[in-house]
Image (cartoon, helix red, strand yellow):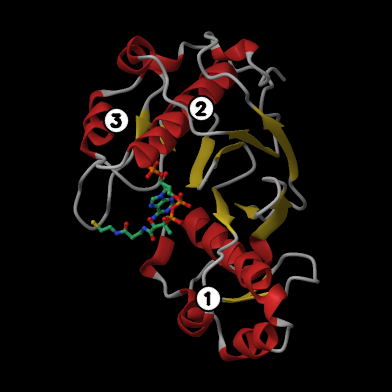
Amino acid sequence: MTTALVPDGHSRVWWATPQQPPADTVSGVLSPPELERAMRFHRDADRRRFLTACLLLRAAAAAHLDIAPHQVHVERRCPDCGKPHGKPHILHTPEPLYASVSHSGDRVAVALSTAGPIGVDVEQIPDAPVNELIRSALTPAEQDFVRSLPERHQHAAFTRIWVIKEAVLKATGHGLRVPPRHVSVSYPHQPPALLDWPLDVPVDELRLSALDPGPGYAGMIATISGAGPVSVMEAEVDDLTRMPFTTIGIAA
Ligand SMILES: CC(C)(COP(=O)(O)OP(=O)(O)OC[C@H]1O[C@@H](n2cnc3c(N)ncnc32)[C@H](O)[C@@H]1OP(=O)(O)O)[C@@H](O)C(=O)NCCC(=O)NCCS
């Protein structure tokens, strides 16, 4: 029996700042493949983002399923190499619970949905020149649009277009196996939309909502649902150490 943390037909997003959780929390909650991955990061910042996302995903799913975070069965299986990484799947029945994770800079996003497969993406708006990114990731029309903007607006415009592309490709699980320059999306001043792509999923089944990760970032969630609009709610989680997670700002 599930709670209504993620009501039918809804998607929810939880935001956190990367944190270094206490060792006993990590070892008591994460699965062996998650612990192994955490140990392999060379940079502390990458490890913190990964650990924060793992704990947040387990906390949110546990709260929805009314079980403990360590009991959540999260499976990641790369279709290319078979290793335990890639799109996370929450393996609990009968009603499917779809999940997605993203991290960039100081922002970690975890999304759950009962509406359909989801992809969430957050990106820090880059300081460095984006010319090469524009050339490699955007369609020719998108390139012309972004380059027509004053240079100070090009970074944010590129990032907004990019998060739409990543969110829709994460929703299907393809990720960047599909070149983003083959995916055509709306411009930043328009409501977010997928216009064209080389996949079988009809573009009008992708429900997009811009997210609010805070200044200097862009965020997007895509839900694959043929059943009309999807309601998306966002919440900030301040303290990952306050177990059980059902009490830390993610109550329904
Ligand atoms: C999905 C992808 C675009 C994310 O890239 P990113 O912008 O650097 O990272 P984000 O922080 O936004 O997202 C990372 C999260 O996406 C999820 N993810 C990874 N691959 C995914 C995929 N194919 N579909 C959906 N989600 C995916 C994971 O939850 C990952 O989090 P984790 O590293 O903490 O487990 C990129 O990893 C990708 O294209 N992967 C597919 C290709 C691939 O991995 N090949 C591996 C061959 S061995």
Indicate if the residue with disc 1 has its beta carbon within 8 Å of ligand 1.
Answer: no
Seen at 67% across and 45% down, the residue is: 213
Seen at 20% across and 48% down, the residue is: 82
Circle 2 is placed at which residue position? Answer: 56
Query: x, y percentage for residue 183?
Result: 54, 76
Q: CA distance from mark 2 to mark 3?
A: 13 Å
Seen at 49% across and 85% down, the residue is: 135
Instruction: Identify which residue, 183 or 229, lies in the foreground.
Output: 183
Circle 3 is placed at which residue position? Answer: 34
Q: Looking at the image, is 91 positioned above or below residue 65?
A: below
Query: x, y percentage for residue 145?
Result: 69, 86
Seen at 50% across and 70% down, the residue is: 200
Quarter of the rendering occupied by the N terminus: top right
Query: x, y percentage for residue 132?
Result: 46, 81
Please identify, in this view, whether the residue under mark 1 or under mark 2 is nearer the observer.
1
Q: Looking at the image, is 144 positioned above or below residue 84?
A: below
Kindly state the secondary structure of the residue where label 1 is placed.
Answer: loop
Looking at numbered disc 2 in the image, what kind of residue is underneath it?
A: Leu
Q: CA distance from mark 3 to mark 1?
A: 35 Å
Could you tell whether 148 is left or right of 102 in the image? right
Can residue 198 be seen here? The reply is no
Looking at numbered disc 1 in the image, what kind of residue is underneath it?
A: Pro
Circle 1 is placed at which residue position? Answer: 129
Please identify, in this view, whether the residue under mark 3 or under mark 1 is nearer the observer.
1
First in sequence, mark 1 or 2: give its number: 2
Query: x, y percentage for residue 24?
Result: 33, 10
